[in-house]
Image: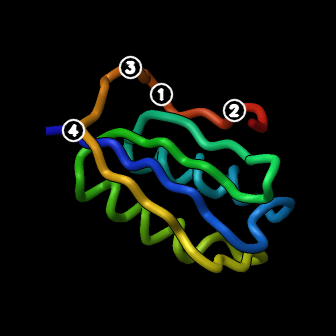
Amino acid sequence: MPERLHAFILGDVQGVSFRWFVGKEAMRLGLRGWVRNRRDGRVEVLAEGERPSLTVLLEGLRRGPRFARVEGVDVDWTEASGEFSDFRIVPTA
């Protein structure tokens, strides 16, 4: 059964290709949803798919790309809505 991962990543995560890193990993894992920067300096991720793939994505979020410094990841798990057909990088919120 598909699930939804909604995460906020804190730290030095903007201006270090974090969104590109997440998008590439999510597409590799066959996930659907989006990633965006937040005006408060966090990165927000909403991804849907099977739990094992979402868990791999979450491990990547905690690590981040090479130049990022992740200080924390706030995560919420819920049932997938099925509203997404692909994974996208969306505008800042």
Which label's residue is closer to the chain start, 2 or 3?
Answer: 3
Q: Which mark is residue 83?
A: 3
Find disc 1 in the rendering and name its residue.
86
Q: Position of residue 36 (x, y in %)?
A: 68, 42
Q: Nearer the viewer, mark 2 or mark 1?
A: 2
Identify the residue shown where x is 43% and y is 64%: 58
Which label's residue is closer to the chain start, 1 or 4?
Answer: 4
What type is the residue that disc 3 sits on?
A: Glu
Find disc 4 in the rendering and name its residue.
2
What type is the residue that disc 2 sits on?
A: Val
Query: Where 62 falls versus 86 (above or below)?
Result: below
Q: Secondary structure at mark 4?
A: loop
Which label's residue is closer to the chain start, 2 or 4?
Answer: 4
Q: Quadrant of the N terminus?
A: top left
Q: Secondary structure at mark 1?
A: loop
Give the CA separation, mark 2 to mark 1: 12 Å
Give the CA separation, mark 1 to mark 3: 10 Å
**Could you tell whether 91 is left or right of 2 in the image?**
right
Give the CA separation, mark 1 to mark 4: 14 Å
Q: Nearer the viewer, mark 1 or mark 3?
A: 3
Find disc 2 in the rendering and name its residue.
90
Does the CB distance between marks 2 and 1 fall below 8 Å? Answer: no
Q: Which mark is residue 38?
A: none
Give the CA separation, mark 3 to mark 4: 12 Å
What type is the residue that disc 4 sits on?
A: Pro
Q: How many marks?
A: 4
